[in-house]
Image (spheres, rainbow, N blue to C red):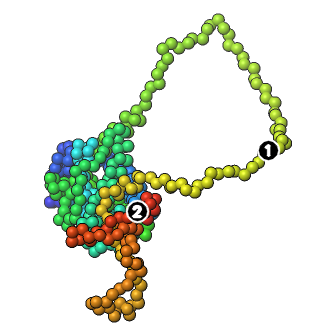
């Protein structure tokens, strides 16, 4: 008999007209119509994320919506499926400062960070360090910024933008919104990211159910306002036909076929002449550079190189000298993430070594070396 009783949630749903309660100030559960709109939001976000990641990675990127549902917020980490996650927190300006989260595995954060720094995401560190965490945070900032710009287009004039952003590692006990009950319903959308030559990973977009409902309703209102038919303006005075004039018959037009004529006049034909391209500098767009301008990079100074056999390496001992392929006094190479950027001379600053830059590689070559 106990299974025949209605739960308190079901009783509340019946009293509220069939709309399930979200259990914590969310304004009711997400309806089927609202979920359809939110699926379009997820699809729009996936398209924007794919475009930004494709530009950053310089290769083919596919992003699809793998999940779009309402679930308790304490189940998000379980859906991510990792003991260690990277969570990016923000509020959405333009949606009543609604809190929002982007979540991925620590491996996904490492992959995104390495792609941001020009790597191939194949040799990742075992654990994220400060450099990678900073790059991952900047990467998520670029992704969500582009996604919100596209979602703003669905609002027909309203502007969404992230603010108060922060990111960091968390464990399995993490919940997206500390100010809400752990069982509070949230909208969860999983974006599956596939980068050519890289292990796939997923990014989860999480919003409180109340904020997701508000977003869906605003989009529906904006769409309904745009689709509302507008009556064509009527002329002030409609001309009336004169009763004294009888209708006139228009004679049918007759058309005679024309014969095609072919001109036999000589035509002046000469080879095309083009201006020489030598000496012109390649124009480079700065849009790609602006996306990664704030990312810290690793600078290495290379004194020289040497090639030795394994036997020579095994015979090394304290005091052994390795002769490099560079003469004393020659400029040293300055590398940024393994790419040659400049040359300089070694100097001593107080008690530390330094490099005085004497030659800068051209801007075009620098950008090409960074793979942009």
Residue corresponding to mark 2 = 360
CA–CA distance in space, label 2 to label 1? 54 Å
Residue ranking furthest to the top:
244
Quadrant (top left, top right, bottom left, bottom right) of the C terminus: bottom left
Please tell me which residue lies in front, 129 or 38: 129
Query: Please, is residue 232 above or below residue 355 in the view?
Result: above
Q: Residues within 10 Å of mark 2 (few under 14, many from 20)?
A: few
Q: Nearer the viewer, residue 354 or 207?
A: 354
Residue at image location 35% in from the left, 47% down from the top: 149
Q: Is residue 55 above or below residue 13?
A: below
Judged from the image, the secondary structure of the residue bearing numbered disc 1 is loop
> Does dot 2 land on a helix, a strand or a loop?
strand
Q: Quadrant of the N terminus?
A: bottom left
Front-most of 198 and 133? Answer: 133
For mark 1, does the 10 Å Cα neighbourhood hold few (<14), some (14 to 19), or many (20 or more) residues? few
Taking 276 as reference, is 367 left or right?
left
Q: Give the image location of residue 143, x and y in percent.
A: 34, 55
Q: Where residue 242 sits: x, y (%)?
A: 61, 8
Instruction: Give the percent coordinates (x, y) of residue 72.
Output: 22, 57
Looking at the picture, does residue 124 appear above or below residue 116?
Answer: below
Residue at x-position 40% and y-position 35%:
226
Q: Nearer the viewer, residue 135 or 246?
A: 135
Residue 124 shown left or right of residue 266 in the figure: left
| Residue 196 appears in the figure | yes
Q: Quadrant of residue 15?
A: top left
Sequence-wise first label, 2 or 1: 1
Q: Is residue 297 left or right of residue 1?
A: right
Quadrant of the rendered structure where residue 195 is? bottom left
Callout 2 touching callout 1 (CB < 8 Å): no
Residue at x 49%, y 53% (from the top left corner):
283
Nearer to us of marks 2 and 1 is 2
* Disc ID at residue 267: 1
């Amino acid at each position: 008999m106990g299974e025949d009783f209605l739960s308190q949630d079901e009783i509340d749903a019946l009293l509220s007209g069939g709309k399930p309660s979200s259990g914590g100030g969310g304004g009711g559960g997400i309806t089927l119509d609202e979920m359809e709109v939110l699926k379009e939001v997820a699809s729009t976000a996936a398209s924007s994320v794919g475009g930004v990641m494709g530009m950053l990675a310089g290769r083919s990127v596919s992003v699809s919506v793998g999940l779009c549902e309402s679930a308790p917020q304490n189940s998000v980490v379980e859906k991510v499926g990792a003991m260690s996650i990277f969570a990016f927190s923000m509020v959405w300006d333009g949606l009543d400062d609604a809190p929002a989260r982007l979540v991925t595995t620590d491996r996904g954060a490492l992959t995104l960070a390495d792609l941001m720094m020009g790597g191939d995401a194949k040799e990742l560190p075992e654990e994220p360090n400060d450099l990678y965490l900073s790059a991952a945070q900047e990467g998520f900032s670029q992704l969500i910024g582009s996604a919100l710009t596209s979602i703003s287009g669905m609002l027909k004039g309203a502007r969404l933008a992230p603010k108060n952003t922060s990111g960091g590692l968390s464990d399995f006990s993490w919940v997206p919104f500390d100010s809400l009950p752990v069982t509070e319903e949230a909208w969860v959308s999983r974006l599956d990211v596939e980068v050519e030559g890289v292990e796939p990973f997923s990014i989860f977009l999480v919003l409180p159910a109340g904020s997701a409902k508000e977003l869906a309703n605003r989009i529906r209102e904006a769409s309904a306002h745009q689709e509302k038919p507008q009556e064509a303006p009527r002329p002030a005075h409609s001309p009336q036909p004169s009763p004294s004039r009888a209708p006139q018959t228009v004679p049918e037009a007759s058309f005679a076929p024309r014969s095609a004529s072919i001109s036999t006049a000589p035509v002046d034909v000469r080879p095309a002449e083009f201006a020489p391209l030598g000496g012109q500098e390649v124009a480079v767009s700065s849009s790609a550079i602006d996306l990664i301008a704030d990312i810290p990079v690793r600078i290495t100074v290379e004194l020289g190189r040497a090639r030795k056999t394994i036997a020579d390496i095994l015979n090394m001992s304290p005091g052994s000298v390795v002769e490099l392929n560079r003469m004393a006094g020659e400029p040293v190479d300055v590398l940024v993430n393994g790419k040659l950027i400049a040359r300089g001379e070694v100097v001593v600053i107080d008690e530390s070594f330094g490099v005085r830059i004497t030659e800068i590689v051209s801007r075009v070559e620098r950008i090409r070396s960074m793979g942009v």
